[in-house]
Amino acid sequence: MLSSKSADNHPLVRKLQSIGALDREELEAVRQLPIVVRDIRRGHDIVREGDRPLQCCVVMEGFTLRYKVIEEGKRQILSFHTPGDIPDLQSLHLKVMDHSLAALSPMKAGFVQHADMRDLCLRYPRITSLLWRDTLIDGAIFREWLTGVGRRDATTRIAHLFCEVYARLDAIGLTEDGAARFPITQVELSDALGLTDVHVNRSLSVIKAQGLLSIKGGTLTIIDWDRLKVLGHFDPTYLHIDPAAVQEPV
Amino acid sequence: MLSSKSADNHPLVRKLQSIGALDREELEAVRQLPIVVRDIRRGHDIVREGDRPLQCCVVMEGFTLRYKVIEEGKRQILSFHTPGDIPDLQSLHLKVMDHSLAALSPMKAGFVQHADMRDLCLRYPRITSLLWRDTLIDGAIFREWLTGVGRRDATTRIAHLFCEVYARLDAIGLTEDGAARFPITQVELSDALGLTDVHVNRSLSVIKAQGLLSIKGGTLTIIDWDRLKVLGHFDPTYLHIDPAAVQEPV
DNA sequence: CGCCCACTTGAACGTGTTCAAACGTCGTGG
DNA sequence: CCACGACGTTTGAACACGTTCAAGTGGGCG
């Protein structure tokens, strides 16, 4: 589960290459996108439910999450996002945000005007397709999460989530020797998995005790990938990672 | 919650009009799409997880559902689809199906070749945008379901689902006097809501006993929309139905 | 040093599950 | 026309996974 690939310093370019192919000219067009980068502090909202943004947000460094708050004050985390992701790309075609976007860690957010994004899409249909594809993968991940929350038990869900996070980080080259930066609290885990923090704590302890993974100080380390995959019933098909972009070791 | 709109006999056209605006030429192009219609029997699969389809499926009449089966033989229903929907539109950009598509009721499925779909998109960028928008709404519905399954109790989830189904049917003109055709079993409900059929039965009985809705013989009747909405914490924003396409009664 | 935040642990509880049986209805065939 | 089977719904009772409430621990940072 290691991958070596052309390291582009632009997170968006690297991400797009992980899910599909673009030619030199198209890549250059992506690099030329006007983008304004801002530092965001951990926990701060970037866009809120009900907003009507005129720009979208590229994760340049760090991590974000999307979430909904419901009446009783409970929260459901909908997704996590890694560098290169555009977590609110949907706002290009859905005027009103139906959920919020926040920083999971201290991060750098790059803002691109919708108008510039639309220009890019009009000039490069293949970029349109690839961005569309990206939002479709987003949907595929929701389906997998829905299945987990609806039909899998706590331990399986936890294992599955770490498998997914690791696989996605690996696809964009952010893993090293089975370890990756991923600073998440147990409360956040529980809000993502539809569990309580207490129960996450107990189930996660068991997984750790079995020597499958360690998560400490913001670093996730996979100790036994094969057994973790089995425990989490993890099959990465739904991530639709371009096989051409990943070199699985023999 | 009634809507009168230009009734087009092409389900896809009607559906697209419910989520956005197209001009005369674009509508005509959609109508001209080569499409092969087939009758499908209730419960039969249309596409299966692992397939690599070269066409996508437009619901012409009746209903479909998407689902995943997990290891232990359990099933999670991911979505329901009404006439005009293209439940596997994602296959245009994601080669491998990560879930299956089946008929919820006896239905007519229209098949459109991916090649024809791509042609249409290349010639009409606004149609591309609208179809993209449609898949984004699909994603928004997944997010809402995820939130429900993750954080809401059984009664709320059930009420919410019926609100959603009714609102969507209303948007495409398939309701009449607070009633709509929607033939679903309690087992299917439970697989959609992440519950057991036994528990759905009990919770649904309570909702019926409170006089909020009736569901019998394949017909869903909303008896008290306001109270049902409150019970289900239903806010239709996430459906992103084009306000211009719906006339809410005063 | 002291506070805050995340994590940990214990014990009682409850929502939803599991297993099992019975009931009703509809369509089919004798 | 009735018997039968299939399927969906209903009901009961025991059980369990995960929750809730509460208290305590540990580490990082001002």
Image (cartoon, coloured by chain):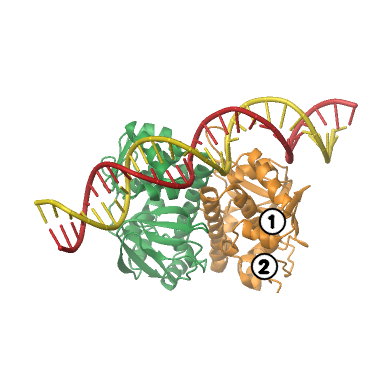
Chain colours: A orange, B green, C red, D yellow
Q: Is residue C5 above or below residue B80?
A: above
| Marks 1 and 2, how far apart at CA | 19 Å
Image position, residue A74 (x, y; %): 57, 36
Q: Quadrant of the N terminus of chain B?
A: top left
- Image-quadrant location for residue B160: top left
Q: Is residue D15 above or below residue A29?
A: above
* Count of picture labels: 2
Q: Residue at x 49, y 54 (%)?
A: B136
Q: Is residue A121 above or below residue B139?
A: below
Image position, residue D8 (x, y; %): 32, 49
Q: Amino acid at mark 1?
A: Pro
Q: Nearer the viewer, residue A34 or B86?
A: B86
SS for tag 1?
loop
Say the numbered circle drawn on residue A83. Answer: 1
Q: Quadrant of the C terminus of chain B?
A: top left
Image position, residue B48 (x, y; %): 44, 66
Q: Amino acid at mark 2?
A: Glu
Contact, CB < 8 Å: mark 1 with mark 2? Answer: no
Say the numbered circle drawn on residue A28. Answer: 2
